[in-house]
Image (spheres, rainbow, N blue to C red):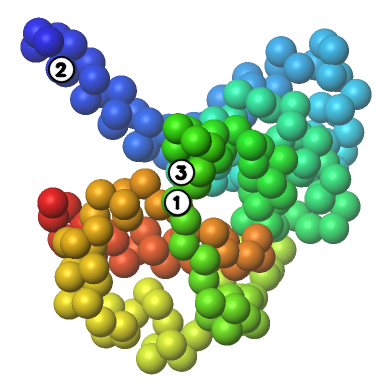
Amino acid sequence: MDASNVIGTHLMEIIRRHSHELFSRQDAKKLLEPRRGRQSKLVEDVVPKLLSLAVLQRVLQNLLRERVSIRDAVSILEAVGEAGNVTRNPVLLTEYARQALGRAIVQPYLGPKGDLPAFFLDSSVEQTIESSVEHGEHSSQLNLAPQANPRNPGSGSRSGYRTWTGRRWWWLRRARVIPAPVARAIVQKCIRAFAQRDPARHEK
C-alpha cells in the first residue's frame, strides 16, 4: 500500500469518527430532498409539521456518533414520526430510530454462524439507571450518587477491568453490551467515557 492510500485510509477513518460533528443542518436538509418525491407526504408530516429540522439533525448526529448508517432515511423518518407524537427529546427519538434500524445495526457484528457475542446488564443495574435518568424536552441526564455512578472514575475496580480485558480482549472487541432500550443511550455514554479515561483499552 503506497503513501497516498495510507493517508486516504486515515482521512476516511477520521471523517467517520467525527462525522457527527461535521453533519450540519444543511446536510440534514439535503438528506431529505431526494425523499420529497416518492415519500413527500412522509417528509412533510415529520419535518416541519411534527419535528423541527434541528431536532432531526440531532437525531442523525446521535446515530452517526455511534457509527450507525443514516442511508435508510425513510425508516428513520417513520420511526421518529411515530415517536414524535410522544416526545421531542432527541435522545429518546434516537432510540426509536435505532430500533427501526436494528437489523442493519446488528448485521456487521454477527459471527459466521449468525451468533452475536454480547453482555447483558444485571436487571438491578438497569433498574438503577432507568430510575435515575431524567428525560427533559431536549435531553436526558443521569443523576446518580457519585459512589453509584459508572462514569465516576473512582467507582468500580479499574485493575480488575485491566486484568479481564487483558485476558479476553479478543472476545471483548467483538462483544456488544445489550441493555434495555430506555437505559441504552446512558449506558453507552458511560462506557465511552470510561474507555476514554482508561488506557487499558489499547492493551493487547
Left/right placement of residue 117 relative to residue 132 reads left
Where does the image place residue 69, in percent across and percent down from the top left? 54, 31
* Up/down of 54 relative to 72, above or below: below
Residue located at (46% from left, 62% from top) = 119
Q: Nearer the viewer, mark 1 or mark 3?
A: 1
Label 1 sits on residue: 117
Neighbor class of circle 3 (other Cα within 10 Å; few <14, some 14-19, many 20+) is some
Point out the tag, 1 or 3, that comes first from the N-terminus: 3
Percent of width and height locating residue 23: 49, 32
Q: Nearer the viewer, residue 116 or 87?
A: 116
Q: Residue at x 38, y 91 (%)?
A: 147
Task: Look at the numbered disc 1 and give the secondary structure of its residue.
Answer: loop
Element on which disc 2 rests: helix
Q: Which mark is residue 65?
A: 3
Q: Nearer the viewer, residue 105 or 112?
A: 112
Q: Disc 1 vs disc 3: Cβ atoms closer than 8 Å?
A: no
**Direction from residue 3 to residue 133 in the image, left or right:** right
